[in-house]
Amino acid sequence: MVHFDRTLEFIDQLQHANTAAAVCEKLLGITSEFGLTALMAGTVPQPGTPRGQQKDHVLLCEWPGEWLERYVARNYVYHDPVVSHMKQLQAPFQWREASQSIRIDKSSGEVMGDAGEFKLRDGLAFPLVTLDGQIVMVSLGGEAVELSGADFGLVSLAATYAIGRAMQLHTMAAQTIDHVELTPRERECMQWAAVGKSEWEISQILGISEHTSEKHLLNAKSKLGAVNRVQAVAEAIRRGYIS
């Protein structure tokens, strides 16, 4: 029961973690007991994804900064034997197993060798599949990793909860960035535009000039990222401004 209480406490702490960095801190507080002191979790970008966009696929990261920069700059994600093994194996495994199971060529050998330079000599990795079929790759590393079979399960469970919280925060951040605030008058103009009223008709209904009604509609269209009135109306409906 003591271990169960600790699990509940960990879950509660995660729910109160409001940044990815805080989630990393809570998770590594558990995994560092087994020598897993660094973390990377995210989706694998499609081949050809610009380097500047690869970091957009990261959900959690507590990796040595210089190592992360080198990893992205050299496109190591496409040569990393740990990533290749995760795509094939739907269960947790230690990095050393990937080196034994995957044919190591010059590129993949370079990845593992460079990781060692940053005291990432071994680790634990596993894929998490979301309900919509998206695969999140989780990799925890360190210099001296000690894991029993039971430890595998414990770390996997903790990481699963952490990734869940990270996904919540990622979604919340995206919604905040994507948030659009229309003024009351812009909403009114959009609502009348949705039923086919012209700028002149809207001006007569609201008691404003035609120029002003046109201005409100243009502002709303710009905020909604629409190219025309039809798209603006559709976007306003999608966001709940027009019911």
Image (cartoon, grey):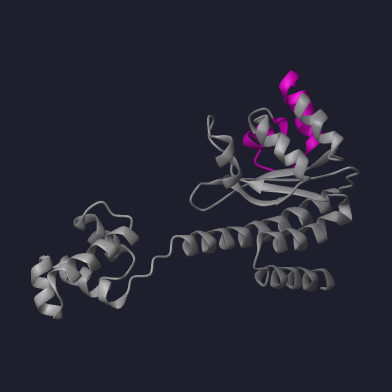
Where residue 229 appears, as percent x and y from the top left, is 20, 57
**Residue at image coords 43%, 65%:** 179
Residue 172 makes an appearance in the image: yes
The answer to which of 55 and 153 lies nearer the viewer is 55
Magenta region includes residue 99:
yes
User: Is residue 92 in view from this perspective?
Assistant: no
Residue shown at 28% from the left, 54% from the top? 226
Measured along the vertical axis of the image, is residue 124 above or below residue 182? above
Most extreme residue toward the bottom is: 207
Residue 231 place in picture, x, y as percent:
24, 55
Q: Quadrant of the N terminus?
A: bottom right
Q: Is residue 98 left or right of residue 55?
A: right
Q: Nearer the viewer, residue 2 or 34?
A: 34
Q: Is residue 73 above or below residue 222?
A: above
142 or 19: nearer the eye? 19
**Quadrant of the frame with the C terminus:** bottom left
Magenta range is 80-109
- Kindly indicate the quadrant of the structure image that contains residue 137: top right
- Residue 163 occupies which quadrant of the picture? bottom right
Report if residue 64 lies within the magenta region. Answer: no
Q: Is 239 located above or below residue 93 in the figure?
A: below
Residue 70 percent coordinates (x, y): 72, 34
